[in-house]
Amino acid sequence: MSRINDETVSAIRDRSDIVEVISSYLPLRRSGANYLGLCPFHQEKSPSFNVNAPRQIFHCFGCGTGGNVFTFLMRMEGLTFPEAVKRLGEKVGITVEETPVTPADRQRRDQRERLLRINEAAGAFYHRLLLEDAAGAPGRRYLRQRGYEADMVRAFRLGFAPDQWEALAGHLTTQGFTAAELRAAGLVREGRDGRGDRDLFHNRLLFPILDPEGRVVAFGGRVLDDGTPKYLNSPETLVYQKGRTLYGLYQGRDAIRHSRTVLVVEGYFDLLALHRAGLANAVAACGTALTADHARLLKRYAEQVLLVFDADKAGRQATFRAMDALLPEGLTVKAVSLAAGEDPDSFLASQGTEALQSRLAAARPALELFLDEQLQLHGDGIEGRARAAEEVLARIRLLPSDLERDLYLKQLAARTGLDQQLLQTRSGRAVTARAAPRPVSQAPRHGEDAAERTQTFLLRLMLVNERARQRVSSEGTTVLFSSPPHREVADHLLAMADATGNLPEQLLDGLADSAAQALLSGLLLAEDQLNWAADPERIFADCRRAVTTGALRQRLVQLQELIRTAEREGDLPAVEKYSLELLDIKKNL
């Protein structure tokens, strides 16, 4: 991809006043050198959102979000970094020009743009057929039967593929697109036995799938007769990866951002039904389970995810798979219970909006439901409770908040009768007695455990002490930092130091990871108030220990899974081998 010139980024940042930008979204009041307000990224009653004008950074000491003016705009508007730079560039009167790209980059960019143009042309063709053409009459009739009017059709740019095999191929060919390009876009199938290419979609109602910028990247099609499959989606292409795309996000992003809650459903009509009922803060996966990329995408807009899946075994399994992807991002994940055989579309049709809103309000944490199911599945015997505990512990480890982990460990101990300290040790999150104390003037970082706090102290030391940076460089960040965001910040500080060892004023530039940006912004804002009294030697020793211990605990989790797999397969020698290694690791821990 093309790249924006660093000097342009710096010029736009220098001309952009972060206080002015953030004030256009939320009220701020001055407090000394900083400005305070209610955080737009989580619900709070007392302001913990801090904007520092001299450093041009922000940080929320409640939820841990932080960064610079570009980061703020990216989170508020769901933009990519280049999009945020261009948006601010327009505001301050700087034209953003992209640096020259390699021939391969240029070719890939041109291919992407060409595919997007093809998809737009296909979407317009199918949309016109549905609205105006006689060939689209079956689609119009079907939508009327389900209660959808023209305004909904236009809002979601719905279309119809006629009962012809070469309608789209013929139309796009007259628009100047080649057969090879249509195949690359996944819109046609290559013909056989001398026949021409055939349209992928045939006699189907079509749902254009848009990216966050509102561009058509793919289609989903529902058959209107007894044909199979019932739903057919575009294949993955250069512009469409289903594991990174969510249907309805473009239409619902403002409602999601405003409510900080997103409803995740399984089907296209489920999503349309929610919008028709006034619940626009919804998305649907495109025929796949939620992924980590989906979770990171949702994190831009929401804090809480309500999973509204079908009330059957497959729906419960989908709920727990989604939970596994969402929890590591720090999102609150709840499951909405519907009656057996119901989905959001049918539930709204039979019981109405108020009934669904009541179900949404009664949503339970997905991890609690998983605990219930595992205990029921494995039974009340000793082995059953142990297996259930292992399954639940694997999910508790996904939680980034130590407070949440402790609360779930207490609940698990109460439900299984197991010792809480044992469960805490098994969770791999036991508190380290030798962790460096936190100065009273420094607020704890959201979700930070003892090992991470020690690494935060080392980063703080690196900020104020050149010799500490030299020592970290000598020992290596992989030896001293087990937390990826901490390690990224450490690498960044080492890379940013100039020939004399000093750090520049603008330290947040070049940090792509939001967690790393939040971590560094918090350290920078706390710098002036920090009463530094920790022991550097102890910090270095504790960081080394955290890396070693983390690796052992990770291997412990792997061994537990390997033992379970070997037991299921009856491989006793493997069970013995892994068990001996597991005992050795426990001894070392």
Image (cartoon, grey):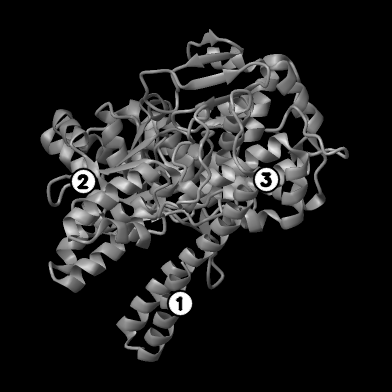
**Residue in view at x 60 percent, y 14 percent:** 19
Judge left or right: residue 321 versus residue 64.
left
What amino acid does circle 2 point to? Asp
Q: How many marks?
A: 3
- Front of the two marks 3 and 2: 3
Spatial CA distance of label 1 from label 2 is: 49 Å
**How crowded is the residue under tag 2: few (<14 C-alpha within 10 Å), some, or many (20+)?**
many
Task: State the SS at label 1.
Answer: helix
Specify the label residue 584 is tagged with: 1
Q: Nearer the viewer, residue 70 or 276?
A: 70
Q: Residue at x 62, y 18 (%)?
A: 18
For this view, does 560 lie left or right of residue 438? left
Residue at x-position 56% and y-position 58%:
545
Type of the residue with mark 3? Ala
Q: Nearer the viewer, residue 40 or 137?
A: 40
**Residue at numbered disc 2:** 343
Residue 395, horizontal then vertical, whole percent = 34, 56
Q: Nearer the viewer, mark 1 or mark 2?
A: 1
Q: Position of residue 417 (x, y in %)?
A: 17, 60
**Separation of marks 3 and 1 at Cα, in angstroms:** 32 Å
- Amino acid type, callout 1: Asp
First in sequence: mark 1 vs mark 2:
2
Screen quadrant of the N terminus: top right
Q: Earlier in the sequence, mark 3 or mark 2?
A: 2
Q: Residues within 10 Å of mark 3 (few under 14, many from 20)?
A: many
Q: What mark, if any, has residue 445 been given in the picture?
A: none
- Mark 3 or 1, nearer chain start: 3
Q: Are marks 3 and 2 in contact (CB under 8 Å)?
A: no
Query: What is the x, y in percent for residue 579?
Result: 39, 81
